[in-house]
Amino acid sequence: MTIALIPGTFDPVTFGHLDIIERAARQFDEVVVAVVAAPAKPAALFDADERRAMLAEVTGSFPNVAVEVFGGLLADYALARGAAAIVKGLRAVSDFDYELQMAQMNYRLSRVETLFMPTAPEHSFLSSSLVREVARYGGEVSSMVPPEVARRLKERFAS
Ligand code: PNS
């Protein structure tokens, strides 16, 4: 059985992430969406359990997708889960430099390959950070995130 790991912060999950998850689920027997517990970035809007719960809800209809929270090195987690590959979406050339560096580091640490999947063009401008910013100021994000996520964003910024 081939397992692919799709790691990320998912703060929150967007239609761009969902598209990559769905397409990877057609290529691998099992996809594990690996939510990083403690992101390297400034404080997350949603804690790890909230990010996991949103992902579990929006991927619930995919029978071969599981959502898990991990801590520590992704390379160690990939080995522990027996992953054949790490799958990452690439939106634009600007993503490539850092993604390449991470892919090479993860390969050095674990010998697990990273496979890049081009983001669907209709989602290529989407990022969780921009979605958070638009939602923070009351902008419409319903074409960018699933309804459950839009609802949670509204709730979070109302409080
Ligand atoms: O969605 P993001 O924020 O681009 O995801 C980044 C993520 C979670 C994939 C990366 O920060 C990561 O792998 N973190 C775990 C710690 C780790 O292994 N760091 C070394 C990466 S080479």
Image: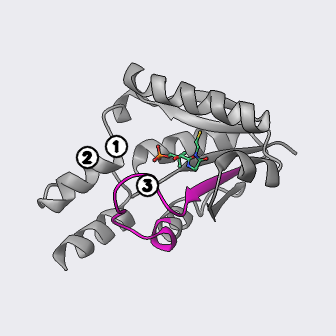
**Residues packed near mark 3 inside 10 Å, few (<14), some (14 to 19) or many (20 plus):** many
> Do the numbered discs 2 and 1 sit on residues whose CB atoms are within 8 Å?
yes
Residue 74 in the image, given as x and y percentages of width and height: 65, 48
- Which numbered disc, 3 or 2, marks the residue closer to the eye? 2
Residue indicated by mark 3? 13
Which quarter of the figure has residue 150?
bottom left
Residue placed under numbered mark 1 in the picture: 127
Element under disc 3? loop
Q: Quadrant of the N terminus?
A: top right
Amino acid on which the number 1 mark rests in the picture: Ser
Q: Residue 33 colored magenta?
A: yes
**Is the CB atom of the residue marked by disc 2 within 8 angstroms of ligand 1's nearest atom?**
no
Real-space Cα distance between discs 2 and 1?
5 Å
User: Percent from the top left, x then y, of residue 117?
Assistant: 56, 28
Residue 25 painted magenta: no
Q: Earlier in the sequence, mark 3 or mark 1?
A: 3
Span highlighted in magenta in the image: 31-51
Residue drawn at 56 percent across, 58 percent down: 35
Q: Residues within 10 Å of mark 2 (few under 14, many from 20)?
A: few
Rendered view: 147 above or below 5? below
Q: Is residue 11 visible?
A: yes
Tell me the residue at 51%/34% (across/down): 89
Above or below: residue 128 compared with residue 58: above
Binning the other alpha carbons within 10 Å of mark 1 as few (below 14), some (14 to 19) or many (20 upward) gives some
Residue at the spot x=79%, y=33% of the render?
A: 111
The residue pinned by badge 2 equals: 130
Colour scheme employed for the rendering of this structure: one colour
* Residue type, mark 3 in image: Val
